[in-house]
Structures are given as structure tokens and as C-alpha cells.
């Protein structure tokens, strides 16, 4: 397996770049945000619970999110690798992910961190909200709260992965293709 984490603040382009990376490297995509949204649509118990957090721009509790990821990895154990998009978002989730993969004799191979400045992020999110219909992209208060959560809970993961020598930061400004080429360069630098 070759396992990638795509990391960055809300609006950094994780979803867009994941789609291109999946195509190129033939990986399995796990976007925890997408899984929550499909559960909300299907009105499942998990969806109902997740919605109460997502609508406020808060993170869904770790135990719920980790159990979901564990289940997903189990169900796709024969995959050639994963792209984790929007997970992990806390140190506990990062630790849990290492354990989940270790149970399959696997590990994270690279963490790609997209760097985008905050003014650009808010602009992108509000634009996306007009097209995607995502409620959490349409309200500036919710967006601001998502950044707060990112800074408090998610950003510390940068050091967590830097210390493991897995962190590769990439400039996330510019055209989609330029950013993609930078990501590919980083992946190919570690992929045998
Ligand atoms: P995303 O699609 O990645 O922007 O996620 C949308 C929302 O889903 C986030 O603002 C969180 O409320 C929730 N969410 C997604 N991934 C996670 C995660 N790993 N941990 C906790 N909450 C998450």
C-alpha cells in the first residue's frame, strides 16, 4: 500500500487535489467530510449526530470519527493505498490512524500539507458555498469557527508529522494543475 494524508485548512483544495491524486496513483479515497455528508443525506443515526456539529463548524467527536475510519479501512483492506482527506484532524485521530494502519501492517507514507493564506481561504469557501450548496460554506460565522477549530485542534498535527519526518509542505496558491504538479513531485520523491 501507499498511504497519503492530504492536509490543510478548510478551503485549501484538499478535495480537488485528492481527486487528481487518486486518478494518478490508483488509490482509495477517504474523505471523512464526504462520509458524514452522505450519512446526513441518508438520515442515518451517524448523520444526525454529525450534522449537529458540522452545522456549527465544530469537529465531530473523535470516537465517532475514528470508529468510522477504522471500519472504512477494514472494508477496503485489499486496496493499493489510501488518500486520507480531512482526517486526521486532531492528535488523537493521528495516533489512532497509525494504530489502525499498523493492525494491517501498514503506515502513512507521506503527509502533503497545502499552504494557503487565510484571506484566500475565506474567499474560496464563500465561492464554493454558492455552488456546492454546503450550508457550512455559506455562513461566515460557521467558516470562522471552522478556522478556529483548525488552529486549535488540527494545526498541531503539523509538528506531529514533522517529527515523524513525513511532512511535505506544498504551496497551495496558483492554478489547480500547478499545485497538482508540486504534489506529484513530492509523492514521487518518496515513492519507490
Ligand atoms: P470537510 O468536508 O473535510 O471540510 O468536513 C466538513 C465538516 O465535517 C468539518 O467541518 C467537521 O465538522 C466534519 N469533519 C470532517 N472530517 C472530520 C474529522 N476528521 N474529525 C472531526 N470532524 C470532521
Image (cartoon, grey):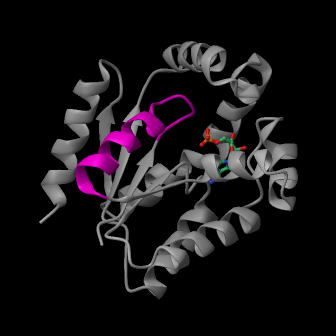
Q: Is residue 21 inside the magenta stretch?
A: yes
Q: Residue at x 87, y 60 (%)?
A: 45
Q: Position of residue 102 (x, y in %)?
A: 44, 83
Q: What span is colored magenta in the figure?
A: 8-26
In the rendered picture of this protein, how many numbered marks are placed on residues? Answer: 0
For the residue pair 134 and 143, the one nearer the viewer reads as: 134
Q: Is residue 188 magenta?
A: no
The residue lying at 45 percent from left, 38 percent from top is 14
User: Predominant secondary structure in magenta?
Assistant: helix
Residue under the point 62% across and 56% down: 90
Q: Is residue 15 visible?
A: yes
Q: Is residue 91 left or right of residue 191?
A: right
Q: Image quarter for residue 75?
A: bottom right
Q: Quadrant of residue 88?
A: bottom right
Q: Quadrant of residue 170?
A: top left
Above/below status of 157 relative to 67? above
Q: Residue visible at 29% across and 67% down?
A: 2
Residue 122 is situated, as x and y percent measured from the top left of the image, at 59, 17
Q: Is residue 158 left or right of residue 45?
A: left
Nearer-the-camera pick, 168 or 64: 64
Residue 168 visible in image: no
Amino acid at each position: 500500500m501507499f498511504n497519503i494524508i492530504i492536509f490543510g485548512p478548510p478551503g485549501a483544495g484538499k478535495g480537488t487535489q485528492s481527486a487528481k491524486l487518486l486518478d494518478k496513483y490508483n488509490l482509495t479515497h477517504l474523505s471523512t467530510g464526504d462520509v458524514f455528508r452522505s450519512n446526513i443525506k441518508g438520515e442515518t443515526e451517524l448523520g444526525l449526530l454529525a450534522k449537529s456539529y458540522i452545522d456549527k463548524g465544530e469537529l465531530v467527536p473523535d470516537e465517532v470519527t475514528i470508529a468510522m475510519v477504522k471500519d472504512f479501512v477494514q472494508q477496503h483492506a485489499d486496496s493499493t493505498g489510501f488518500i486520507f482527506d480531512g482526517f486526521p484532524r486532531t492528535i488523537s485521530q493521528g495516533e489512532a490512524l497509525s494504530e489502525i494502519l499498523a493492525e494491517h501492517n501498514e503506515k502513512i507514507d507521506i503527509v502533503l500539507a497545502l499552504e494557503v493564506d487565510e484571506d484566500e481561504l475565506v474567499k474560496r469557501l464563500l465561492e464554493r458555498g454558492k455552488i456546492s450548496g454546503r450550508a457550512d460554506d455559506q455562513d461566515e460565522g460557521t467558516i470562522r469557527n471552522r478556522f478556529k477549530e483548525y488552529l486549535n485542534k488540527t494545526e498541531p498535527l503539523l509538528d506531529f508529522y514533522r517529527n515523524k519526518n513525513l511532512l511535505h509542505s506544498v504551496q497551495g496558491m496558483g492554478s489547480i494543475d500547478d499545485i497538482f504538479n508540486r504534489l506529484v513531485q513530492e509523492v514521487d520523491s518518496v515513492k519507490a
